[in-house]
Image: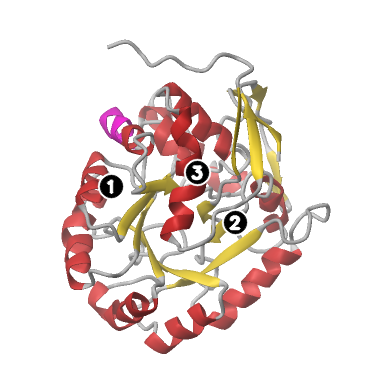
Amino acid sequence: MASPATAPEGTKLTITLPDDFHHHFRDGPSTANVLEHATQQFGRCIAMPNLRPPVTTTEMALEYRQRILSSLPKELPHGSFEPLMTLYLTDNTSPDEIKKAFATGHIKACKYYPAGATTNSDAGVTDVKKTYPALRAMEEIGMVLCIHSEVSTPGIDIFDREPVFIEEIIKPLVKDMPKLKIVMEHISTKEAVDYVMSAPDNVKASITCHHLLYNRNALLVGGIKPHFYCLPILKRETHREALLGAATSGSNKFFLGTDSAPHAVEVKEAACGCAGAYTAHCAVQLYAEAFDSMGALDKLEAFCSFHGADHYSLPRNTQKITLEKKSWIVPKRYSFGISQLVPIRAGESVAWSIVSN
């Protein structure tokens, strides 16, 4: 089968300003560095709560929100960017805390981390049944549940943790709470694509740009490339193809969530390196590459700007950004607080540029 025709150099595409429904801003001096990138291409970002200590209460979430706002670029027009906050779900999160958080208008979701599944998840959920009182409150008020959909059970192969989670956790949860709005975040397997497509309409999924563009060869062939190490881990090419097909299908079941996760270079390039790929510097441009590779640029706007906002019951953005197929070279490093980080595509080209926002 012939490859789809891609857009010629110089092609311009104007779309509604995207939102990112999975973003790691970190906390402290490095937050300002992350925001320099995120605010260039997103109107709103869901802020992940896996800080140290984790953001488990309404007060902690509102305080974190204020720290993010205080770190915004000084030249950014007031009100042009909004962090959307989340609570870190634990075995002990109460229904009252859920209702209190949602009533603020600033806390849009709770994040379910299986204990030990990823970075700073040690305080996460040990038994989904223990969260049912909180989840029933969320179902009642319409609050979104964001799920890192992998088991952390010892002995389960790291490449199989998402399919096992679907069978053991997601399917029973959806049956027990048919009105709970769920996002399976950063899905990485064909099994997840197939499940989300067949699931009720309250179950949707975010997909990262790095899972659309790379398979596990990028991480492992020719030596270990630590800056491609993320969780969920990159999978076989068959899974990448399934994700790419889902994202570019036009289905409102799938939307943008970068899971851009910055780490200082010294903790990535280490004997036991941290999981996380940094894409905030060029995420929308990388999504454009992925959609262009499928001849599906006409589906990019809905994926980036409509489907996620609709699932979160948010108004769609009114601002626009313009992309141009004009390549540029990514710097080898970016500032990250008192350190530096190595981004995806460091020292390499990205085919698309943002030329106005």
Residue 304 - label: 3
Q: Is residue 197 left or right of residue 144?
A: left
- Secondary structure, magenta segment, majority class: helix
Residue at disc 1, secondary structure: loop
Front one among 199 and 290: 199
* Disc 1 packing (10 Å; few <14; some 14–19; many ≥20): some
Q: Is residue 150 above or below residue 41?
A: below
Which span is picked out in magenta? Answer: 235-242
Give residue 299's position: percent from left, percent from top: 44, 34
Report the number of discs.
3
Q: Using the numbered discs, state the Cα–Cα distance from disc 3 to disc 1 in whole angstroms.
A: 29 Å
Q: CA distance from mark 2 to mark 1?
A: 32 Å
Q: Is residue 241 magenta?
A: yes
Is 46 located above or below residue 34 in the figure?
below
Question: If you read the primary sequence from the N terminus, does the residue marked by circle 3 or circle 1 appear first?
Answer: 1
**Which structural element holds mark 3?**
helix
Q: Which is nearer the N-term, disc 3 or disc 2?
A: 2
Which amino acid does the dot numbered 3 rest on?
Answer: Cys
Find disc 2 in the rendering and name its residue.
Answer: 44
Foreground mark, 2 or 1, reads: 2
- As drawn, the label of residue 158 is 1
